[in-house]
């Protein structure tokens, strides 16, 4: 059975659980700070703890695929378990894989993350459009069939991104704006929210683009990268109600204590509510 469209499921999750996405980023330094070994045992303990602490209360969990892939097939097995358990507990899972390719290769990536029969099936996946927005068609089509979502890189928080994303297309628009306009076309007429989202860094200050895409706006950079929930209205303007702020280390550094992880996530969620709604 096809799921309700991702945009609708995300809107409900944000309204009921609060508009917060928490990353699952088991990099070596974070494992060490938890007193865990940088191996499969440490990865499994870290991931299980985060899912146990947060999957029943935050809107979105965002595992970073690379931190699992670095352990090979056993790491991917841990990721498969995390995705299944997080979704079972009610969290939407956004796979942060940033895939981007053409033709059958993009189709294979789409089958990996957006086919309901895949062990890595996720509610949404991040993708890169800088081989041309049309290269994403296999992922967009697969997501539409399964009721999943796609988050497209638009304006990222890393400073190097500007040399591509702020460059000018043939018609005078920035490449970022061109991609955002494509997303708006994909989301046209969707209610209450489209299923094609944009990734726009919360650290940008004034984004300087039109973010009215009728879709969700994933905002990484909250916490350790320097942005705060109070920065969101200035960056996102009238589209701030569709923002999904993403925090990773700001919450994860409070582990391995489950209560402390939950408390940190709740504090960020409260700060986001205050920033967005007063």
Image (tube, grey):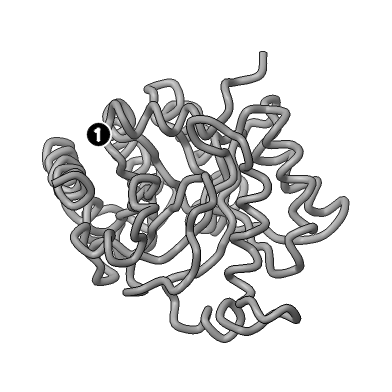
Residue 51 on image: x %, y %: 34, 34
Q: Residue furthest top?
A: 1
Which residue is labeled 1 in the image?
53
How many C-alpha atoms fall within 10 Å of the one at disc 1: few (<14), some, or many (≥20)?
Answer: many
Q: Nearer the viewer, residue 37 or 264?
A: 264
Q: Residue at x 18, y 48 (%)?
A: 268
Q: Residue at x 28, y 60 (%)?
A: 232
Image spot of residue 233 (x, y percent): 27, 59
* Residue 135: quarter of image: bottom right
What's the residue at 12%, 41% (across, down)? 263
Q: Which of 82/139 is in front?
A: 139
Q: In terms of image quadrants, where is residue 188?
A: top right
Above or below residue 147? Residue 46 is: below
Residue 256 visible within the image: no
For residue 29, side relative to residue 6 (left or right): left
Q: Secondary structure at mark 1?
A: helix
Measuring from the top left, give residue 96's x and y in whole percent: 52, 52
Residue drawn at x 64%, y 63% is: 179
Q: Is residue 226 above or below residue 239?
A: below
Q: Where's residue 81, x and y in %?
A: 49, 32
Q: Residue furthest right?
A: 104
Quarter of the figure that contains the N terminus: top right
Of the pair 114 and 239, the residue shown nearer to us: 239
Query: Which quarter of the picture shows residue 117?
Result: top right
Left/right of residue 190 with respect to residue 144 in the rendered view: left
């Amino acid at each position: 059975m096809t799921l309700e469209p991702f945009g609708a499921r995300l809107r409900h999750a944000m309204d009921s659980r609060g508009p917060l996405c928490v990353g699952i980023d088991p990099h070596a330094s974070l494992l060490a700070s938890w007193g865990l070994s940088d191996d499969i045992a440490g990865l499994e303990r870290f991931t299980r703890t985060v899912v146990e602490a947060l999957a029943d209360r935050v809107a979105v969990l965002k595992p970073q695929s690379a931190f699992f892939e670095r352990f090979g097939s056993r790491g991917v097995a841990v990721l498969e378990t995390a995705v299944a358990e997080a979704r079972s507990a009610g969290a939407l899972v956004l796979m942060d894989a940033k895939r981007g390719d053409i033709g059958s290769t993009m189709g294979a990536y789409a089958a990996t993350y957006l086919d309901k029969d895949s062990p890595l099936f996720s509610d949404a996946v991040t993708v890169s459009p800088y081989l041309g927005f049309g290269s994403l068609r296999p992922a967009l089509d697969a997501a539409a069939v399964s009721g999943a979502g796609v988050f497209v890189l638009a304006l990222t928080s890393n400073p190097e991104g500007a040399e591509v994303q702020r460059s000018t297309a043939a018609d005078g628009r920035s490449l970022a704006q061109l991609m955002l306009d494509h997303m708006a076309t994909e989301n046209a007429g969707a209610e209450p929210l489209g299923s094609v989202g944009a990734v726009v860094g919360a650290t940008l200050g004034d984004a300087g683009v039109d973010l009215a895409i009728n879709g969700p706006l994933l905002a990484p950079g909250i916490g350790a990268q320097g942005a705060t929930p109070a920065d969101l209205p200035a960056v996102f303007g009238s589209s701030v109600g569709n923002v999904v702020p993403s925090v990773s280390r700001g919450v994860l550094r409070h582990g391995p204590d489950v209560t402390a992880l939950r408390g940190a996530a709740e504090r960020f969620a409260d700060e986001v509510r205050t920033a967005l709604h007063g």
